[in-house]
Image (cartoon, grey):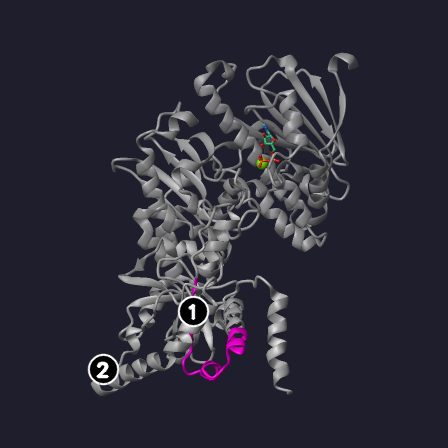
């Protein structure tokens, strides 16, 4: 018999061992979640079963109904959770319960610090799932059989959670999975009828499946009869005012595999329109660990008339909203739809447009009613939403309103929206100014900001490496064009005085300076002919002697770096050198001899490179030049 049973002893994948260790040691303050996780798995298994049985009725084995049964045995110290869902084959058992399939797991686990509180926090976004059984059990036995296979294809999996497990073949008459938890010595609280019931109703009241427990007599004796403990109506099918915030939150944890509360949600039931659908969409409070992984799927759970069809359906939410979680239930799709057909079913674009609208509504509402919460959202997902203007042309204006940037007119760490900016614009200002830089401090001290600072004109500080790309897809907002302070000629209309005499005086001054510096500009142009496109007098500097600017339609330095990093060949446009005609150094340059002028010009140019965050081709030569000029002071 032992030979027939083909018992194998196997090691958990290294990541599983690590995860098990963390789960057991960091989740002790919230032990009861083990039941939520195991019920969630049983519910998923029943959903999968129902979906597969649609196209293969033989799987029903004379019983198409599904339910979850939970029982305990105080004397034997066990809790049993059984379902008649899809079950697992031997190979599936080994893969599903012995390895972690999520990509990026190793990197994620490497981030964990060993600090239990912090790790408990992080592990929440990862989802502990099945392994949470070991929080309360010192041994877990899984008996399972895949629906459709003969009873001799049952599998028994067993582990003490200490690094290895065994699998063997068993006979199992009914399809589905039975999980037996051998409860740890000091976890007796879970071997109680009322305790289990309260956990079930707390977490799983509105799963779309009945959870049964034995009926108890008034003096707390178990009977042979089973009764449903939860309400078992899919939450999204209920009217909003019949749902409490707690229920919404618990349901979120189920769909999102998250242990923390969601940040916000939106729930709609649209009937009698041209497409009937219900959706319950959540914004997570924190970004999942794999948000930026290319090969992970994000998306909604799809139901057709309450029947679960597919997980992580990406068609309904565009990539820039990939952080949302939730369910979509519709009668507009056929029950037997496959992933392939789903790709180009004609109702998809309509549903997608509707869902995008709901999400953008939700975000707008949050931004308006609860800016602090919106700031939390922005911190976690802002960089995803920034992909919006490029991806979703139709909603560009709405998305633009939701973007947030650091600003010269906001406190450090605070972000402002474009609408705030527009509301604060100067009387004659018709452009939204921004600067791109490596970080806020570099942006704030850039010479390009000098004229803006002097005149108290707000400038947005774009410090993320994709920001320049984002604004390149936003030529304007509410009729105001977006303008880099480091590009173009920047004659600031808002500074032009109305007073005719003053205007004339200014023009005269400009012309006089132009004349005064004409020959110096020519000489500098010759010296830097390889490096720059042009040298000219500046309107933007007040305290710095010089800065580099780009042509209006050229790539900025941030965009250049981004494209290079993406492996693209970038034709580098030469910058324009602008000089401050009021600056003592520039004035002094007029009287220099040839050799000195050459030195000074190089220094001025290289300083301007440094100030815009670019690196110098020959840093050591720059230092030598500075020292040489410096030493002159001692002569
Ligand atoms: P997740 O539910 O996030 O996939 P879990 O750790 O909870 O992760 O479960 C791992 C996998 O084990 C599931 O994806 C599923 O394939 C399988 N599994 C767990 N419990 C059951 C069950 N009751 N019936 C069938 N398969 C199950
Ligand atoms: Mg699970």
Q: Position of residue 458 (x, y in %)?
A: 38, 72
**Mark 1 or mark 2, whichever is nearer to me:** 1
**Label 1 vs label 2: CA separation?**
35 Å
- Tell me which segment is drawn in magenta: 575-600
Q: Which residue is mark 1?
A: 525
Is residue 407 one of those drawn in magenta?
A: no
Q: Position of residue 185 (x, y in %)?
A: 77, 41
**Residue 74 point in image, percent of width and height:** 72, 35
Are dots 1 and 2 in contact, CB under 8 Å?
no
Question: Would you call the spot at circle 2 few (<14 residues within 10 Å), some (14-19), or many (20 or more)?
Answer: few
Q: Is any part of residue 409 visible from this angle? A: no
Counting other residues with Cα less than 10 Å from the Cα at mark 1, is it few (<14), some (14-19), or many (20 or more)?
A: some
Find residue 76 and report its horizontal and vertical position in percent: 74, 31
**Which label belongs to residue 575?**
none
Screen quadrant of the C terminus = bottom right
Q: Secondary structure at mark 2?
A: loop
Can you identify the residue that label 2 sits on?
Answer: 498
Viewer-side residue, 40 vs 82: 40
Q: Secondary structure at mark 1?
A: helix
245 left or right of 74 in image: left
Q: Quadrant of the N terminus?
A: top right
**Mark 1 or mark 2: whose residue is earlier in sequence:** 2
Tell me: 58 left or right of 419.
right
- Up the image or down, 378 lies above or below 441; here it is above
């Amino acid at each position: 018999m032992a030979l027939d049973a083909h018992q194998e002893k196997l090691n958990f994948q290294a990541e599983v061992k690590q995860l098990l260790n963390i789960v057991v040691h960091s989740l002790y303050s919230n032990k009861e979640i083990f039941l939520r996780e195991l019920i969630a798995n049983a519910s998923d298994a029943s959903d999968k079963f129902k979906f597969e049985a649609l196209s293969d009725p033989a799987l029903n084995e004379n019983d198409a109904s599904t339910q979850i049964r939970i029982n305990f045995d105080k004397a034997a110290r066990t809790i049993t959770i059984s379902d008649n869902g899809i079950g697992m084959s031997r190979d599936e058992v080994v893969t599903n319960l012995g390895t972690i399939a999520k990509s990026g797991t190793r990197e994620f686990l490497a981030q964990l610090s060993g600090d239990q509180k912090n790790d408990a926090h992080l592990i929440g976004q990862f989802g502990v799932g099945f392994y949470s059984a070991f929080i309360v059990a010192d041994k877990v036995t899984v008996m399972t059989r895949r629906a459709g296979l003969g009873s001799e294809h049952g599998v028994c999996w067993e582990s003490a959670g200490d690094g290895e497990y065994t699998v063997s073949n068993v006979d199992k008459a009914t399809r589905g999975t039975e999980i037996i938890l051998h409860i740890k010595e000091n976890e007796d609280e879970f071997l109680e009828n009322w305790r289990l019931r309260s956990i079930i109703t707390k977490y799983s009241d509105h799963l779309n499946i009945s959870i049964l427990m034995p009926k108890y007599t008034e003096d707390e004796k178990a009977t042979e009869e089973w009764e449903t403990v939860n309400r078992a109506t899919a939450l999204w099918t209920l009217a909003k005012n019949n749902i409490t915030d707690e229920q919404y939150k618990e349901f979120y944890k189920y769909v999102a595999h998250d242990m923390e509360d969601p940040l916000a949600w939106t729930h709609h039931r649209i009937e009698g329109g041209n497409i009937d659908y219900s959706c319950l969409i959540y914004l997570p409070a924190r970004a999942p660990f794999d948000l930026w992984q290319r090969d992970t799927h994000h998306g909604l759970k799809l139901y057709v008339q309450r029947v679960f069809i597919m997980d992580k359906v990406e068609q309904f939410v565009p990539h820039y909203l990939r952080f949302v979680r939730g369910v979509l239930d519709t009668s507009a799709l056929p029950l037997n739809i496959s992933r392939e057909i789903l790709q180009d079913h004609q109702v998809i674009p309509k549903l997608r447009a509707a869902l995008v609208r709901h999400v953008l509504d939700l975000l707008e509402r949050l931004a308006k009613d609860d800016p602090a919460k919106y700031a939390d959202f922005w911190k976690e997902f802002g960089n995803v939403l920034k992909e919006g203007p490029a991806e979703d042309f139709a909603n560009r204006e709405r998305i633009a309103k939701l973007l947030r940037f650091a600003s010269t007119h906001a406190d450090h760490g605070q972000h402002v929206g474009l609408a705030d900016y527009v509301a604060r614009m100067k009387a004659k200002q018709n452009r939204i100014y921004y600067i791109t830089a490596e970080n806020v401090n570099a942006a704030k001290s850039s010479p390009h900001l000098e004229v803006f600072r002097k005149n108290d004109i707000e400038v947005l500080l774009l410090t993320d490496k994709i920001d320049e790309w984002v604004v390149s897809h936003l030529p304007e907002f509410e009729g105001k064009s977006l303008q880099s302070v480091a590009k173009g000629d920047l004659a600031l209309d808002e500074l032009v005085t109305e007073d005719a005499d003053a205007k004339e005086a200014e023009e005269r001054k400009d012309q006089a300076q132009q004349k005064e510096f004409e020959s110096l500009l020519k000489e500098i142009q010759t010296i830097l002919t390889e490096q720059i496109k042009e040298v000219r007098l500046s309107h933007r500097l007040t305290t710095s002697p010089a800065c580099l600017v780009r042509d209006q339609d050229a790539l900025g330095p941030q965009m250049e770096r981004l494209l290079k990093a993406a492996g693209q060949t970038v034709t580098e446009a030469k910058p324009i050198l602008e000089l401050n005609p009021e600056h003592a150094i520039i004035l002094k340059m007029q009287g220099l001899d040839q050799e000195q002028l050459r030195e000074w010009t190089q220094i001025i140019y290289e300083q301007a490179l440094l100030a815009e965050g670019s690196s110098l081709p020959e840093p050591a030569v720059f230092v030598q030049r500075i020292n040489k000029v410096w030493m002159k002071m001692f002569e």
